[in-house]
Image (cartoon, coloured by chain):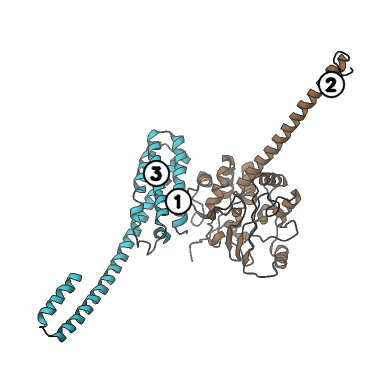
Chain colours: A cyan, B brown
Amino acid sequence: MFTLSIGRQQQINALAGKTLDKEESNMRNTIIITAASIMLLVIFYGESSFADSHGIIKYRQNVMKSTAGHMGAIVSILKNSLPMQAHVADHARSMMQNSKMTLSMFPKGSGEGRTKAKQEIWGNWSKFESAAKAFERESAKLAEVAESGDMEAFAKQVRTTAKTCGGCHKHFRERD
Amino acid sequence: MWWQPQALPVKNKLIPALCRLGFWLCLFLIIVNQAAGQSLIDTGKYIFHASGGCSCHTDTKNDGAFLAGGKPIKTPFGTFYGTNITPDPETGIGKWSDDDFIHAMTKGLSPEGNHYFPVFPYTSFQWITHEDLLALKAYLSSIPAVRQKNLPHDLILPFGRQAAMIVWKNVVWSPQPFISKPEKSESWNRGNYITQALAHCGECHTPRNLLGALKTDMHFSGSKEGPEGELAPNITPDINTGIGDWSKVDISYFLETGIKPDGDDTQGLMLEVIEHGYQHLRQEDLDSIAEYLLSLPPIINDLKAE
């Protein structure tokens, strides 16, 4: 858009001859055209950011749901002593992989729209970041313990990991 | 000389023997007494956990001292501040007698005879046995005393509060006796006692009328205006709007960990009462709460519907 307006200015200059008056009016035209371009850009950018945040919100809700789904699956196995203990390592690994996505799912501006994400995320990013990193760390441990097959240690690590969910949810997620 | 051993051999043996016996007896009694005191404190600590760790009395958000008060509790009637229940004699409850404590917990009366607002759930604590109350007091006396003045409540009712409370207690509140059902199992009755009296679940999970009294016909069916202005869900076993699709083990695991059956976690005051209280309960007590809750009549109350 900017290049367009500059191009237009050169065009206008070329057409306008060499008198001082005409150059002044050219200047005015250039200013108007540039301002309009900037307005267009703002409108265009604004719209695209809304479209983007809508997609991002849906995306991260789906990722969060899948994390909760794996957590739910793990605790179902644990509390009901289901004969699916061999599955827990896969669930834990999926959680660990999801956990690595957390921070990139919250770009600036993605708090606008139908989301429970609070604005404080971007107001206090370092706190949010360290809470998300804690979840990442404990999920990695969870996957590790799951691999070892020690179900008692695993059940303990499930609780430790679940506590790190609250690290973000407590301060940064709107309640129902 | 008379005290010399050679002069009086019989007394010589008897007196030290008596002394020795006396010494051991004293030591034994002291130890037994200490042990009894300690076990009373331990019992009290368990009662404390079953009551949700008295979480309204610790200002966790601002890293406030343990049970020293200051936590804001938003209600439709204004903002209350949890009080200091540490054994500090000036700002806490260090000077309270056993009777003072029992009166406060069961009748909502301060040692000076002032009426407490029912935000302090004596409406549930009235059902706790005196034995459990005294144990709880012994535990509270054992924690570190913290000198911290209570904050004045910030309420919509600017004056005449005591008069209003007298009216409330005598007209609005109709205290019911605790109902145990001998025909039901022991664990059901235990669950009934923990849920209603100790854990005082109904105080948040039952809707209130305009005068702040619990709507007994909607018992446990949830409230839109729970503490901190948050929603307290329907915990009757209605399949769609309550916890009818939770199993016994779902409930007991939730009370132990804060993890819901769908893998999501709980937050707010519920997380605090779990963290500082319910998670420390014995498995059989958690199971009894679950058994009791699932035996309640399901009530349809969709809190998310506008």
Q: Position of residue A32 (x, y in %)?
A: 23, 79
Which percent across, then down, holds residue A75?
A: 45, 43
Query: In the image, which disc is placed on residue A80?
Result: none
Residue A1 appears in the rendering: no
| Position of residue A50 measured from the top left corner of the image (x, y, whole percent) | 32, 66
Total numbered labels placed on residues in the image: 3
Q: Alpha carbon of mark 2 to alpha carbon of mark 3: how far?
A: 70 Å
Residue B81's image quarter? bottom right
Which residue appears at 37% of the width and 48% of the height?
A: A99
Amino acid at dot 2 = Ile
Q: Amino acid at mark 1?
A: Gly
Of the residues shown, which amino acid type is indicated by label 3? Arg
Q: Residue B249, can we see it?
A: yes
Mark 2 residue crowding within 10 angstroms, few (<14) / some (14–19) / many (20+)? few
Q: Position of residue A35 (x, y in %)?
A: 25, 76
Instruction: Kindly report the distance in space between the C-alpha atoms of the residues bearing marks 2 and 1.
Output: 68 Å
Residue at the front extreme, as displayed: B1
Q: Which residue is mark 3?
A: A137
In the depicted view, which residue is nearer to us: A164 or B28? B28
Q: Nearer the viewer, residue B49 or B7?
A: B7
Q: Which residue is mark 1?
A: A167
In the picture, measured across the screen, residue B149 lies left or right of residue B24, that is: left
What distance separates the C-alpha of mark 3 from that of mark 1?
12 Å
Q: Secondary structure at mark 3?
A: helix
Question: Seen in the image, is A139 located left or right of residue B198?
Answer: left
The residue wearing badge 2 is: B15
